[in-house]
């Protein structure tokens, strides 16, 4: 059967969450789910689920690249296992009024406080970026933004490939910001569609200090790699800490 959409998700001890994705996608018969197994031992729960990878933890970006390579549809949706999306939201994204040949687009993503946050440039106090909140609205069309989150990102397979996919040197965090920046430099556009919203709390699996500190360090490293491409080490380090911290400055 021809697929109109390939949904790519990454398993890292997320089997129960992916079962929820499989159930949700049952309402979309022309959609396949590709699970990149970064944790090992994942077994598909649907005949439309394909598993790739050998259980080695490739990191998020490289895993998504592997999923994209194995996709049978022309449009990709990168979707985190812990993102709460409904079939109607995916349909709306797929039908959004965008130039699919040169666009990365995504929904308004609600965080744990039910706010939608994006980035603007330049930032305050010499920082490269600043955060701002966006109001989801059923009446607003898709609008340009600096980036859309890899937690729920739609892009054509051809355009994704043409800009090189996710960067191999970013293991986790900031790979979406890096991809969007390269897409714009290649003549593409990045759009957020505030008429479509999903929930993604991000890192909600543990409130322990050690787990939160580990996430902060990993986020800092990913953002540092991205920022050091065109900034000196001190500037990159300061801006990476700002982005990893989540502070709205």
Image: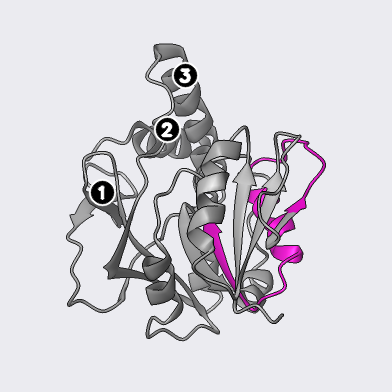
The way the protein has been coloured in the rendering is one colour
Q: Residue at x 72, y 80 (%)?
A: 1
Residue 64 inside the magenta-drawn segment: yes
Which SS class for mark 1?
A: strand
Residue denoted by label 1: 131
Tell me which corner region of the image, top left, top right, bottom left or bottom right, holds residue 147. bottom left
Q: Which residues are magenta?
A: 51-78
Residue 172: x and y in percent read: 57, 40
Residue denoted by label 3: 211
Tell me which corner region of the image, top left, top right, bottom left or bottom right, holds residue 140. bottom left
Residue denoted by label 2: 203
Mark 1 vs 3: CB contact within 8 A = no
Which SS class for mark 3?
A: helix
Q: Residue at x 50, y 48 (%)?
A: 20
Residue 183: x and y in percent read: 53, 70
Mark 1 vs 2: CB contact within 8 A = no
């Amino acid at each position: 059967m021809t697929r109109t959409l390939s949904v790519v998700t990454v398993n890292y001890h997320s089997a129960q969450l992916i079962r929820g994705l499989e159930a949700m996608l049952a309402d979309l018969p022309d959609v396949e789910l590709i699970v990149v197994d970064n944790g090992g031992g994942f077994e598909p729960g649907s005949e439309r689920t394909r598993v790739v990878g050998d259980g080695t933890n490739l990191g998020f970006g490289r895993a998504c690249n592997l999923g994209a390579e194995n996709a049978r549809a022309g449009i990709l949706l990168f979707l985190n296992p812990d993102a709460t999306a409904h079939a109607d939201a995916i349909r709306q994204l797929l039908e959004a009024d965008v130039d699919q040949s040169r666009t990365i687009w995504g929904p308004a993503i609600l965080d744990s406080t039910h706010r939608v946050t994006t980035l603007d440039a330049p930032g305050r106090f010499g920082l490269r970026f600043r955060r701002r909140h966006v109001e989801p609205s059923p009446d607003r069309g898709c609008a340009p933004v600096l980036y859309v989150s890899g937690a729920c990102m739609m892009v054509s397979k051809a355009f994704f490939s043409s800009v090189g996919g996710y960067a191999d040197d970013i293991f986790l965090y900031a790979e979406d910001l890096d991809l969007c920046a390269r897409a714009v430099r290649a003549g593409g556009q990045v759009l957020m569609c505030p008429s479509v919203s999903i929930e993604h709390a991000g890192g909600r699996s543990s409130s322990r200090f050690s787990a939160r500190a580990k996430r902060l360090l990993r986020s800092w490293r990913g953002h540092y790699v991205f920022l050091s491409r065109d900034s000196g080490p001190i500037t990159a380090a300061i801006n990476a800490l700002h982005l990893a911290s989540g502070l709205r400055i």
